[in-house]
Image: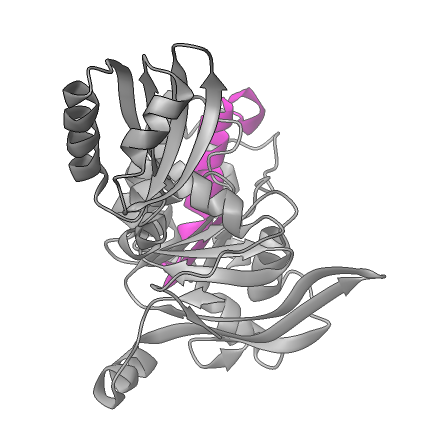
């Protein structure tokens, strides 16, 4: 697994004091299918976590186990000091959960459903009205309170499910694919809601869309085939792109002449000849040198040799590229990572 954080004793103790969720060696099998494979991680207070992975990676299964919806084959989940199996009521009290498909009663109005959810959560009767009004204001559902849920758009249904999840204002809010199926405007609105909730809650956001978690999360955990394969902040994961730049250029010259120029550059690791003709070469260069510096040197050298460069650009690996690489069959070793 790739990780980025190293702690001294003092910072490690501080982290331990901050831990809200501990997932320890979690495994879940469905028959012969291994959905979650010896998964371990911790969640700290006051942060937004992105739980990222391709479809079928085991994200929803892990979340269902963490929230007590299903049991694990082995391993344990500790929520704010309470084992989800041994003390389910105390553990679940700390969590608000929005599944990918919210369990809504479509023939209820929004307010009816929220009062019903408040009763299920055993919120004292004297507090229910104030709490329902507060969450409707927070999630911007007041104008929809008397509408039947079946007549709401998907975006407002998601809001209704989210309002039910945060009733009783738990420490942890877990959202499984909260923007799936929403239009761009609705996605932006849900993201803003998540940022608002994060001011007072720890939020765990599951998604298979990198841009979504990169946009709003403090930390990202990448899961593939039931295993945690990388974790870190967006900036730390960005470090994986270092050294993954290529330079692409087209030179109006024959292959032999271009090779003679390139032979003067010791910092070029590899050259891919993408398209070669009698008087033109389209090539891709891999280098361990700063790409901007080598571009300037190449331009100058080809100009001195009277070989016009008609195009030149740098291809930088994105986090999307890294994500695809990490969740593929091969995971590249980098100097910035530590391996557990």
In the rendering, at what x and y percent does residue 97 appear?
A: 50, 53
- Position of 300 relative to 78 (above/below): above
In the rendering, at what x and y percent does residue 153 appear?
A: 49, 22
What is the magenta range?
148-175
Q: Nearer the viewer, residue 8 or 167?
A: 8
Residue 183 is at least partly visible in this image = yes
Residue drawn at (52%, 61%) of the image: 229
Residue drawn at (66%, 67%) of the image: 37
Q: Residue furthest right?
A: 31
Number of dots carrying numbers: 0
Residue 123 is at least partly visible in this image = no
Q: Nearer the viewer, residue 310 or 130?
A: 310
Coloration mode: one colour
- Position of 287 relative to 143 (above/below): below
Q: Nearer the viewer, residue 338 or 120?
A: 338
Residue drawn at (63%, 59%) of the image: 226
Q: Residue furthest bottom?
A: 9
Does 159 appear in magenta?
yes
């Amino acid at each position: 697994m790739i990780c980025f954080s190293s702690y001294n004793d003092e910072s490690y103790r501080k982290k331990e004091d901050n831990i809200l969720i501990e997932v320890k060696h979690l495994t879940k099998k469905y028959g012969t299918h291994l959905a979650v494979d010896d998964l371990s991680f911790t969640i700290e207070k006051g942060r937004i976590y992105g739980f990222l992975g391709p479809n079928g990676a085991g994200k929803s299964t892990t979340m269902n186990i963490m929230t007590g919806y299903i049991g694990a084959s082995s391993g344990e989940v500790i929520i704010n000091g309470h084992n989800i199996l041994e003390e389910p009521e105390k553990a679940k009290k700390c969590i608000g959960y929005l599944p990918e498909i919210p369990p809504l009663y479509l023939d209820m109005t929004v307010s009816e459903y929220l009062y019903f959810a408040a009763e299920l959560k055993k919120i004292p009767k004297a507090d229910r009205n104030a709490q329902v009004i507060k969450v409707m204001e927070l999630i911007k559902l007041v104008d929809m309170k008397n509408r039947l849920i079946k007549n709401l758009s998907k975006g407002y249904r998601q809001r209704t499910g989210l309002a039910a999840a945060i009733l009783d204002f738990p420490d942890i809010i877990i959202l499984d694919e909260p923007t799936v199926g929403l239009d761009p405007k609705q996605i932006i609105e849900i993201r803003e809601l998540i940022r608002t909730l994060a001011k007072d809650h720890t939020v765990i956001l599951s998604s298979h869309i990198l841009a979504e978690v990169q946009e709003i999360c403090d930390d990202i955990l990448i899961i593939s085939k039931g295993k945690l394969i990388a974790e870190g902040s967006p900036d730390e994961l960005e470090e994986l792109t270092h050294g993954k730049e290529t330079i692409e250029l087209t030179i109006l010259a024959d292959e032999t002449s271009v090779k003679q120029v390139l032979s003067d550059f010791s910092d070029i690791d590899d050259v891919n000849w993408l398209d070669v003709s009698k008087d033109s070469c389209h090539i891709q260069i891999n280098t361990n040198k700063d790409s901007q510096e080598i571009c300037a040197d190449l331009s100058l050298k080809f100009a001195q040799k009277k070989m016009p460069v008609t195009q030149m650009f740098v291809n930088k690996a994105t986090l999307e590229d890294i994500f695809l690489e990490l969740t593929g069959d091969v995971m590249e070793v980098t100097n910035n990572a530590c391996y557990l």
